[in-house]
Image (cartoon, rainbow, N blue to C red):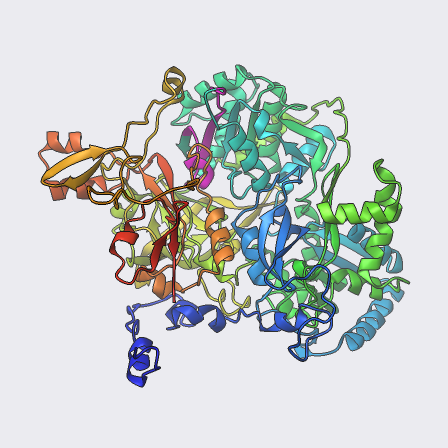
Amino acid sequence: LEELGNNPEVIKKAEKEFAEEIPVDKFLSKESLAKTATPRRDFLKFVGFTVTAASLAACESPVRKVIPYVVKPENVTPGVATWYATTYFDGNDFANILVKSREGRPIKIEGNKLSPITKGGTNARVQASVLSLYDSGRLANPTSKGANTTWESVDKEIKSKLEAIATKNGNIRLLTSTIISPSTKQIITEFIAKYPTTKHVVCDAVSYYGIQRANELSFGKFIIPTYNFDKANVIVSLDADFLTNWLSPIEYSAQYVKNRKVNKDKREMSRHIHIETNLSVTGSNADMRIAAKPSQITEATLSLFKALGGSVSAKTLPFDAKIAAIAKELQNNKGKSLVISGSNDPNVQVIVNAINNLLGNYGTTIDLDNYTTTKQGNDAETIALIEQMKKGEIAALLMWNVNPVYTMPSSLGFAEGLKKTELSISFADRADETANLAQYICPDNHFLESWGDAKARTNQYSLIQPLIYPLFNTRSAQESLLIWSGSTVTNYQDYLKAYWEKNMFPLQTVESDFRNFWQKTLYDGVMELAPVANSTLTFSADVNSAAAKVAESTAKVGTWEISLYQKTSMGTGNQANNPWLLEMPDPVSRVTWDNYITMSPSEVEKLGFNTQLGLNEKADVIEITVNGKTIKAPVLAQPGQAAGTIGLALGYGHTAVGKAGNNIGVNAYELASLENGAIKYSSYSAVVGSVSLEKYALCSTQSHHTIMGRDMVKETSLNEYKKDSKAGNTKPSFEVKEGSKHVKKTAKELDLWASKETPGFDRPGHAWGMAIDLNACIGCGACVLSCQAENNIPVVGKDEVRKARDMYWIRIDRYYSSAMTKEVAEKEGKGVIEMYNAMEKPEDQPQVVFQPVMCMHCNHAPCETVCPVIATTHSNEGLNQMTYN
């Protein structure tokens, strides 16, 4: 009653409900957002995410007064969502998607099942991208030397300067991430025609140049092939996290799972062998996982080639016996196997090509004719550009969807070269580390505000359409290039339609009228042409030369080696200001809001660092030096980390990305180096400093890391499953009190409501249920982000996560195996407490299992029996219905 009457005392007490704060001793950055006390429910407002601007931009004509529709738009019904097909590509992730819109505001992303590439799949980063649309950290206007200006002024000044530079034959460079848009490439061609001294250079945040260069040396094609994991009986991955990060993870995870599912009619599954340094999601799912140093993985490539009959020498490795067994499995599956490597060294990739060539995998599991186009970065051209910039030889530099001041190794000196450039223009949507140094920032639209097209594979095309009018005074980069090149068509939508009518429409044979063809393709989102027939390939690389360079690179190794990797949430860091991704628990470590140095638990203990993995632990901060660059970061004891190695995630450590992402973690890109003309993300020589007096509070959403003898995970081997499809599935048992007796019943029979007096709930119709195939669940966490977007679940910030107040409705628990069991404890005479403490200690190289825990809208929800205010009601379809005020 007091609440109903808004009693001042009640309101005052409610405001102080969660007022206490857990003090944090020291943080690496004094400006860290994690230190700031912020009400949980207002967190997104605090970091500048709002739909206020969208209220005006939902329609092209801003709504001035709230009035009912006289003539309602045909496709808008208040309260009813509309779905539109479009395409997501940010230079790292690709997906054909459907976007849910309410009253003109996009709110949710799903996969487009018509896509022949991603087949209806998305990942966490794609799911979270809808939130970036509402980030008020985006630039609201173009800027000139840091001050807001108008598009008219910018166009006049830039066009004049470009023409002056072209007149005196000054070098103009367009530096972009990978562009897969055919129409955009045509616009760039026309821009170069206007300014002939222009050259287009492609630079991706994480480079895959090594694969392209190796294919050029091997087959004369500077491309990345299409990999068919669903056609491989045996998959061998040499440090390639293909399920969540490497190349095209959404596509590969769907293919992978297809061959991992078993049932009564399909009793076979692919075999997955993984060699890696850092424990990844992909490695966690492997049938055989080998933890190795980066130098050992490089050597293992030679060892495997030699074991398959290649004429190269190889060093002795601790796991040579396993390499021999792997080679035998591959030989037994020629043409039905796949060997991949995460290395960016062209020489390593040449050896991998030689292995696949010996195994006859080209034309089956590897397709060089219908190749992927989503990674086109050229390290050689990028490095040459930086050298020209430092010499003052570049007059104008236009930068689009790149942030090289942040992503390039600091030793290359991009920032130094940029300062010597006469004209610098960035199309960044915010004043990031690189855009801050540019003279002009001409902010590009968000992809949900944009028109466009995509060619992700030789024969796969898709369209991009806007879901909302631009929230700010931004403009597509394509329109800027059209205007500056003096094109007669400056509206990109018109240009796109004309391009498709001239170039795409003649390729298809279904529609005879372009208008119908355009509408259908826009509606479906995708267009697929017949695949290119497989050509005859001749492997022509100099394997001996590549092998010699590989051996030379591993000749000198230090005490410690480092491997830089991408987190499943943060990826390359181009969405580093997205709170959903910052707070998303890492699928393996379960840590949020930070990156950190990973070491094996035994070495962490040996060095005297804190080994605890649990919630609210204070990590030791240490210094590491790699390639002459020293950084400070907290240490996490990570089971599965190879001995003698450290890991550090890319994508963190921004200083100018926005309120949420600034000064979170450290920038690992600075530790990358240049070797054999390519960017290298590992080092065979790193120096680990002594323990610092500083402590850093890491936060985790999981405080127990093994099953501790509990009967939580049921599993069996494939051989046992073939003998009995119920293998490993023991019947569950529950203790319930009936009178003075304890009886055991099956889960189907158990009813918390039923008793002698009442029969329980009446179910006149059907009842809902959910089942997850744990052989198919890879633990990636895409569903966690999808649920957050679908239900608008609050982000609470680091301090609140440390108090165990994260709000997720879904979580994916991760459990490590432990050497301690009840049987071992009994033999060793351990007491109960001592036994469980030992059980909670994971093995240094554990097996891993993921256990999804859903939102529990279940048939027999225990919350229903105890809720004092009947907030949890039960439907006659067996659903637990949560009712909130």
Above or below residue 808? Residue 300 is above
> How many numbered marks appear?
0
Residue 463: horizontal and vertical position, in percent?
Answer: 73, 49
Confirm whether the magenta stretch covers residue 278: yes
Q: Would residue 339 appear left or right of 149 to someone viewing this image?
A: left
Above or below residue 490? Residue 719 is above
Instruction: Identify which residue, 378 or 282, lies in the foreground.
Output: 282
At horizontal 85% and vertical 64% (from top left) the residue drawn is 490
Q: Would residue 209 appear left or right of 788 to someone viewing this image?
A: right
Asked where in the image residue 759 lies, by quadrant, the reply is top left
- Quadrant of image for the N terminus: bottom left
Instruction: Identify which residue, 653 or 304, lies in the foreground.
Output: 653
Q: For residue 636, say whether it is visible.
A: yes
Residue 342: horizontal and vertical position, in percent?
Answer: 54, 38
Q: Identify the magenta region.
A: 265-288
At horizontal 39% and vertical 54% (from top left) the residue drawn is 881
Q: For residue 547, say whether it is visible.
A: no
At horizontal 73% and vertical 23% (from top left) the residue drawn is 537
Residue 873: horizontal and vertical position, in percent?
Answer: 35, 55
- Quadrant of image for the C terminus: bottom left
Residue 174: horizontal and vertical position, in percent?
Answer: 75, 58
